[in-house]
Amino acid sequence: MSKDASLLKGNWNYPTTVWFGVGRITELATACKQLNMKRPLLVTDKGLVGLPMIKALTADMFGHGFDIGIFSDVKPNPSGKNVDEGVLAYKKGKHDGVIAFGGGSSLDAGKAIALMVGQSRPLWDFEDVGDNWTRVKEQGVCPIIAVPTTAGTGSEVGRASVIHDEKAVLKKIIFHPKMLPQIVIADPELTIGLNVKVTSATGMDALSHNLEALCSPGYHPQAEGIAIEGIRLINNHLIDAVKDGSNLVARSQMLCASLMGATAFQKGLGAMHALAHPLGATFDAHHGLLNAILMPYVLQHNADVIEEKMQRLGNALDLKDNTSSGVISWVLQLRKEIGIPHTLKEIGISEDKLTEIAEKAVNDPSSSGNPKKMSKADYEKVLLAAIIGS
């Protein structure tokens, strides 16, 4: 494994075009030209919009002759209102493409805005249920460039966005194949500014994607191979990225693991995400942190049906105990080392809405990918364990 981040560079086409490596953000103007963008709208969040990286980027784009606009009214759990307002900004500025720039929230919002700029139906008509995606006017979806600044969601290589329906108090998955960005610029230097807590939570989010993809039932050896390698990279590099945020090798490998998780979970997710979605919508909690806390409790519930996969994973990680129990112990130790709370109670989530969350989890699309069919009672049991730490 290279210890020189400059060697970790390449152009990939899997599942979309990815320009990966330190310094690749300088090629943003080239990417816009390839997609015939002249007036792109940069979609980001309020935390990033005032940072030097955004100011430098916009100055460079103006210098290359691009009339770039910025929309930054994106919440940590992006809402339908955020998307609607982004569409208005796009139309008002007469833009011709979207640059989704930031963490999973900005990427999800940016992709949803790009979808909606040419639609006549409301956003929720494209929820990932049945064949709703066929309602999309494909010619109305504008070009998308995705630039991740966190190593967690992998939304940059996904064909969907998770958007908060505030009226229904639900997170809904909006899906269409054309929401897959045409070009991804994955520059590890852009993740250097992440603080310890965000690095930890987003890194565990990447782990949850890879883990749930591996555990999801069905025959998909490509996804399982990607997932196991993604988990191995996280095992080798997440702690280093947390302890030394300027470690570009660790940052690079975590960005790879994030991309890999989102590629692999096309096979399916599971109960971690089925619970995290309604918890995030109800308590406005960080998605990656929720997955991190829920992880060992869900693995324990599924343990008897994922033993063979956990043995393969344990061997790949060179664990002394290559059983489900050994993998869960590894997860617990990893969480401890990077400062993840052990219970949901520690982040302010109580038993008050236990039944409501369990009911929503049963109906969440991610639930169908769990290796065990989950009832409302099953979700209540797992959620209670995660709240009190039993």
Image (spheres, rainbow, N blue to C red):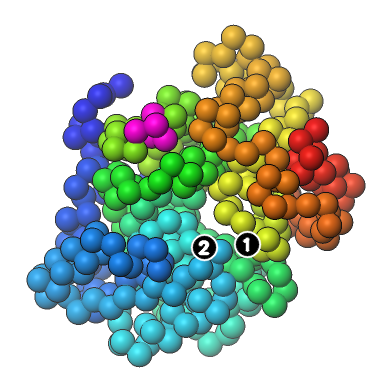
Task: Judge from the rendering whether residue 36 lies leftward or rightward of residue 148; answer left or right.
Answer: left
Prevailing SS of the magenta stretch: helix
Residues at marks 2 and 1 touching, judged by CB atoms closer than 8 Å: yes
Q: Quadrant of the C terminus?
A: top right
> What SS does tag 2 mark?
loop
Instruction: Look at mark 2 in the image and give the residue it sits on.
Output: 76
Magenta stretch in the rendered image: 240-244
Residue lying at 75% horizontally and 30% vertically, measured from the top left:
300
Q: Decide if residue 134 is in sight here.
A: no
Q: Position of residue 152 (x, y in %)?
A: 47, 46
Q: Position of residue 129 (x, y in %)?
A: 68, 65
Q: Nearer the viewer, residue 164 or 143?
A: 164
* Local crowd size for mark 2, using a 10 Å CA cut-off: few (<14), some (14–19), many (≥20): some
> What SS does tag 1 mark?
loop
Amino acid type, mark 1: Asp
The dot on residue 284 is: 1
